[in-house]
Amino acid sequence: MRSGRLVALLLHLQNRSGGATAAQLATELEVSIRTVYRDVAALQASGVPLWTETGPHGGIRLVEGWRTRLDGLTGDEAAALFLSGAPHAADALGLDTVLVAAQTKVMATLPADLRTRAGRVRQRFHLDAPSWFAADERVPHLTEIATAVWNGRRLDLRYARRDREVARRLDPLGLVLKAGVWYLVARHRTDIRSYRVSRITAATARPERFERPDGFDLGTWWTRSSDDFARSLMRFACVIRVSSSGWAHLHRVFGPVVAADAIASAGPPDPAGWREMRLRAESEEIAVGQLVMLGAEVEAVAPPNLRRAVAGIGAAIVANHRDPTGPPQG
């Protein structure tokens, strides 16, 4: 762990011709200022020509003209640096790794041929893991698929859909790891789609290569595809009004895609700061539960069934919180 941090510190300084303060380095490396000074002393003791200067224009610097190179990295090791967010993913893809320092800093020090190879990883393997990984699925053909992705070779596979198994000849463009689940992004004829790798029952790389689509970026495509899928689940349409406070919590309650679409449909605020907007949810029942989370900062306008359901929950909440010591209800 410390060796990786020392490399990161050295690369930070190498990429800053004017040096950096201990506070800046501590923030970038997410350590204490005391740790920065200890690491600087360790680098100096190992022969790295670092010097420090106090005062308003002081800081930590490398001797001008001195540079280091991360020699000895193999192509696979350089590529695997870009999977450092999920070490088990690198193992699953068959890339033996020695993970070091921050990938963007390492990129600046790699020889040209390794820099090109490492950059290819970001175009072919995108990690999207916003939550804790779920239990691993069986993906016996992942290595074969990853090899075809890496080498740009067509792929014949069999895919188990919900109703039947189908055969596909694909141009494999990339692999995505989404919360522990692997997806293959591939072109079938003219369409680009995603395939859950655990449902692939057979995979064979073909000898011929294919040309990647001009301007295709795996991360951008995945984000857009994920957003479109989220929208396709939202089949219930309604109209609501939210206060300025409720507006601030839309993303938290409804998620970024639904909230962004609702905000885009919003009208101008009334004198009290309330805005009317169109909203989509998976169902009326789910919409009721989400709207209640905004409390008094939201009004269900339409359809009438939604308005009555939200009002009914509000009345039940009032009844449940009636003061038991108050006058009897006649």
Image (cartoon, rainbow, N blue to C red):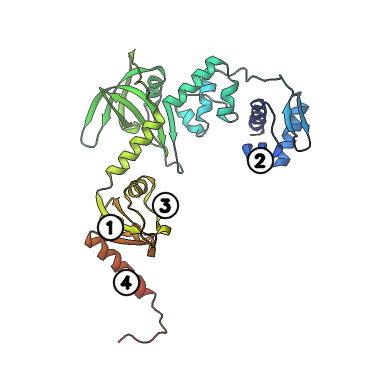
Q: Earlier in the sequence, mark 2 or mark 1?
A: 2
Say whether residue 227 is left or right of residue 22: left
Mark 3–mark 1 Cα distance, whole angstroms, equals 18 Å
Residue bearing the label numbered 2:
31
Q: Residues within 10 Å of mark 1 (few under 14, many from 20)?
A: few
Mark 2–mark 1 Cα distance, whole angstroms, equals 47 Å
The x and y percentages for residue 234 are 28, 47
Q: Is residue 138 visible?
A: no
Do the CB atoms of the residues marked 4 and 3 lie less than 8 Å apart?
no
Element type where label 3 sits in the image: helix
Residue bearing the label numbered 4:
315
Q: Which of the numbered marks, if any, corresponds to residue 252? A: 3
Q: Earlier in the sequence, mark 4 or mark 3?
A: 3
Most distant residue in the front direction: 271
Q: Where does the C terminus fall, quadrant-wise?
A: bottom left
Quarter of the image for residue 13 reads top right
The amino acid at mark 4 is Ala
> Please, is residue 16 above or below residue 323 in the view?
above
Q: Earlier in the sequence, mark 2 or mark 3?
A: 2
Element type where label 4 sits in the image: helix
The x and y percentages for residue 213 are 34, 21
The amino acid at mark 1 is Glu
Residue displayed at 24% across by 37% down: 162
Mark 4–mark 3 Cα distance, whole angstroms, equals 25 Å
Say whether residue 311 is left or right of residue 91: left
Residue bearing the label numbered 1:
285
Mark 2 or 3: in front is: 3
